[in-house]
Amino acid sequence: MDTILKRCTSLILILCASISAVTYAQNSSTTKPSAEIAVEKYVWDLTELYPTAEAWEKDILEINARIAELPKLKGSLGKNAKHMQQGLSEISNTYKQASRIYVYASLSRDEDQRKADTQERFGKARQMYSQFVQAISWVNPEILSIGEKKVQKFLRKTPELDKFRFYLEDTLRQAPYTFDEKTEEIMAKGSLVLSSAGQIYENYANADIPWPSVTFKDGTKAKLNQAGYSRLRGDADREKRKQVFDTFWGTWEQYADGMGATLAAEVQSNIFVARARGYDSVLQQNLFNDGLPADIYTQLVTQVNNSLPVFHRYLKIRGKLLGVDDLRYYDIYPPLVEANTGKFSLSRSKEITFEALKPFGKTYLDLLEHGLSQNWMHSHPQDGKTSGAYMNGSAYDVHPYVLLNHNDDYQSLSTFAHEWGHAVHSLLSNANQPWETADYSTFIAEMASTINEILLEEYMIAHAKTKEEKLFYLGQALESIRGTLFRQTMFAEFELAIHQAAEKGEPLTGPKLNKMYGDLLKRYHGQEEGVMTIDDAYTVEWAYIPHFYYDFYVFQYATSISGAAWFAEQFLAGDEKVRDAFIRVLSAGGSAHPHDILLKEAGLDMTKAESYQPVFRRMTSLMDRIEALL
């Protein structure tokens, strides 16, 4: 159970409600300020987790007392099958309640990270998790001491143990990398310290960096925090885009040394744990924990690098449509063409998403419709709110929660569909799995969200009313592949490179990270081939990426869009068997290792080169359709 602290991280999927539901007004008076009338805002109802902060405080005291009792179970699991079932059930039920406590603290903090009371509750929740991990540090060693023969005998004898089967068998699989009881206890005591770098990053990025305001040549002003940057980096005015890039990345560069030390601390923590447990590398540890074959990582990187000419073709089309001869990094985000798509308000995003996902059929749509009729979402940017988007599905007995930073643009619509893919995945898993196997891997989670983006893209392309609108949506679909396949694989190469450098004893500093990241940026974007110029001022982008604190998380975005394209290619051709297989994959939760689930339920083998070809075929098809319209 040494991966317990990762559960909330794996289910808070970043990188993420209700439209017709009861919502919280932003102003309790009957006359709202005009600024609030202009934007429909929705705030999640955390009272479904806890009616008041005082109720939460009472529950965390109770759960801490319950956690303190767990070590008393030590030595009982091997007595007989009934004792094992009772002991594991008490640990599991305590964990489930602890997760609910953590979710409340995490969500309330993310609404506004400047508030001292929510920061304090989140700190208490993190401490609670650390204590929980310490309290059960003896469990895995005890299961290993019981031995596989006796464990299997207990499983055959007691059906109530079946919900723990995968956990027990996976624990036995990890025997070579599991310490004795005393050492596991020491490792557990260090878990809070070892996970601190990510918390430091979050405080910097979301609360402590004084984001500048910028005045553009037309006299308009904007605050370039993370939400402001995301909104303005795709502006049609090239001079404005450059000013946004120069200002935003210039701000990050001021913190490059500190952020370099923070990321280096994360890397060193990962290396310490991997080496202490006897893994060859941090990469091996992370793949092994999810039961993923090493060939998946290497196959992904190989196939993406082999297909960089396909990516470069897209960049050349981008330059042509933008009318830019010397393509720069600040030209990567504006739409290929301007189109009058209208605003994608939350209500419109809901309606379009539901229509686009109709090919999924009744089972999926019923869950989506129910979720969209509830107040499960925090919708719009506000000062102090965490950036990005995520879905948190860790409150098993309640429901998923969705955080957005909705800007009423097409990207916001796409993010809406993406995060609701995660939410329906949680609903399917929770409906078909007990708590013990409901937690699913990121490896499959991102397929559940990315396929929604593909279906949305094809829906928007098919329903475009003008040539310009069709070009716009084709371009957005290409951007999705760029951002999810090529960009995330580039991130994965960077993450592997910095860990390999540190594993060889090389220091990681801000300037060194700029150089390593910059080299990858230039290779991926074809600087030597004259495709795009990457200015050195923008190579500090690594400091902005939160996913580097999630331990080899990013490559799974890239494998996911590849897998999603594999499903979608058949799905869009009308193969209902593939659709049903996909629903079974989502319903399987964490009942087996993710690659095994894909193989068993759908026949998808991500270690094979051919599994990655549908996404490249899709990209080529999108570019062919664009060129046919020009």
Image (tube, helix red, strand yellow):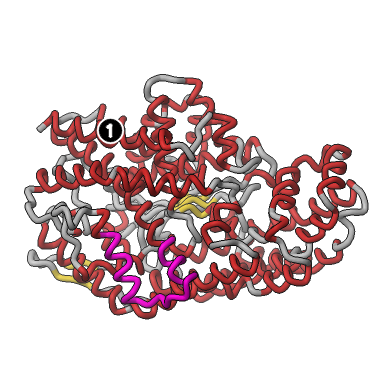
Is 511 in the magenta? yes
Label 1's element? helix
What is the quadrant of residue 49 in the picture?
Answer: bottom right
Residue nearest the viewer, comparing 537 with 72: 537
Q: Residue at x 48, y 25 (%)?
A: 578
Q: Amino acid at mark 1?
A: Met
Counting from the top left corner in percent of width and height, residue 211 is at: 29, 73
What span is colored magenta in the figure?
495-521
The N terminus, quarter of image: bottom right
In this figure, which residue is indicated by the disc labeled 1? 460
Decide: few, some or many residues near mark 1? Use Cα within 10 Å; few <14, some 14-19, many ≥20.
some
Residue nearest the viewer, comparing 383 with 146: 146
Is 76 in the magenta? no
Counting from the top left corner in percent of width and height, residue 322 is at: 11, 48
What is the quadrant of residue 180 in the picture?
Answer: bottom right
Q: Residue at x 59, y 75 (%)?
A: 193
Left or right placement of residue 58 versus residue 501 in this view: right
Residue nearest the viewer, comparing 54 with 314: 314
Q: Residue at x 57, y 42 (%)?
A: 594
Q: Is residue 343 visible?
A: no
Task: Find the residue positioned furthest to the right.
Answer: 79
Q: Is residue 317 visible?
A: yes
Q: Residue at x 56, y 40 (%)?
A: 595
Counting from the top left corner in percent of width and height, residue 574 is at: 41, 19
What is the quadrant of residue 386 in the picture?
Answer: bottom left
